[in-house]
Amino acid sequence: TPPLQPFAIRFGDDNATLEPQGQILQRRMSDLEGLFADRRAWEQAVADGDPVVYTVVSSPVPEVSRELPQSITTIFPGDTGGEFWMTKGHQHPDPQGEIYLGLEGRGGLLLFDGERAEWLDITPGVIGYIPPGWAHRSVNVGDEPYRFLAVYPGSAGHDYGWVLTHGMGLRARRAEGTVELVPFGTP
Ligand code: S6P
Ligand code: ZN
């Protein structure tokens, strides 16, 4: 593929979309099997209407080498068995850096390199830096949608199996109006 031509990308209404727009992805509760610690609560949530947990709206920049794709993730507010709603989380098979820019709501960026776990609070105007080799998961810790812009190298790829095998080091739980980070337990 030849490189793209220069073009402007704008934030749409409520910072929810990018214009022009590429792919839109929707992840429902049923897509998140094996991720929440409380499997019973997850099964119940799937049976109770299988809600959309998050969406990812991308610009038309493709995921190919040398290009720099971007997307806005919106995680809806909620918890399952006390664990805040979150993304699946992944590693980039070709380890490269990535940035997240907070746009709306209150979120957290959980990072895990296989040994150490880190938590970054992400609110509007904050950039979270994801170094090469750190798996990452986003969490909505607020009561409204949490949105952020991700910018990442097009050749990085996405490995979702890694998190199922290694876990993410920590889990984010709802605790009396605040966030409690607890050890991950057995993946
Ligand atoms: C891509 C970047 C984000 C996530 C999105 C959904 O490298 O990190 O755009 O894809 O937040 O999370 P996940 O873990 O389902 O891809
Ligand atoms: Zn990523």
Image (cartoon, rainbow, N blue to C red):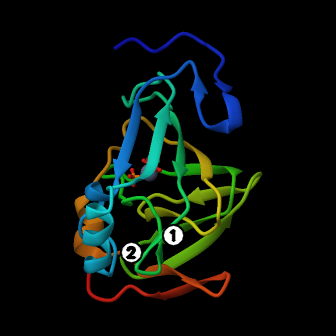
> What is the three-letter code of the residue carrying label 2?
Met
State the CA–CA distance, disc 2 to disc 1: 7 Å
The secondary structure type at the circle numbered 2 is loop
Q: For the residue with label 2, is its CB less than 8 Å from the closest atom of ligand 1?
A: no
Quarter of the image with the C terminus is: bottom left
Q: Please give the label number shown on residue 168.
A: 2
130 relative position to 166: left or right = right
Where is residue 84 shown, x and y percent of the image? 50, 72
* Mark 2 or mark 1: whose residue is earlier in sequence: 1
Q: Is 98 in front, or is 56?
A: 56
Q: Residue at x 49, y 13 (%)?
A: 4
Q: Is 178 in front, or is 135?
A: 178
Q: Are marks 2 and 1 in contact (CB under 8 Å)?
A: yes
Residue at numbered disc 1: 110
141 relative position to 164: left or right = right
Quarter of the image with the N terminus is: top left
How many discs mark residues in the rendered view? 2
Where is residue 58 shown, x and y percent of the image? 48, 32
Q: Please give the label number shown on residue 1.
A: none
The secondary structure type at the circle numbered 1 is strand
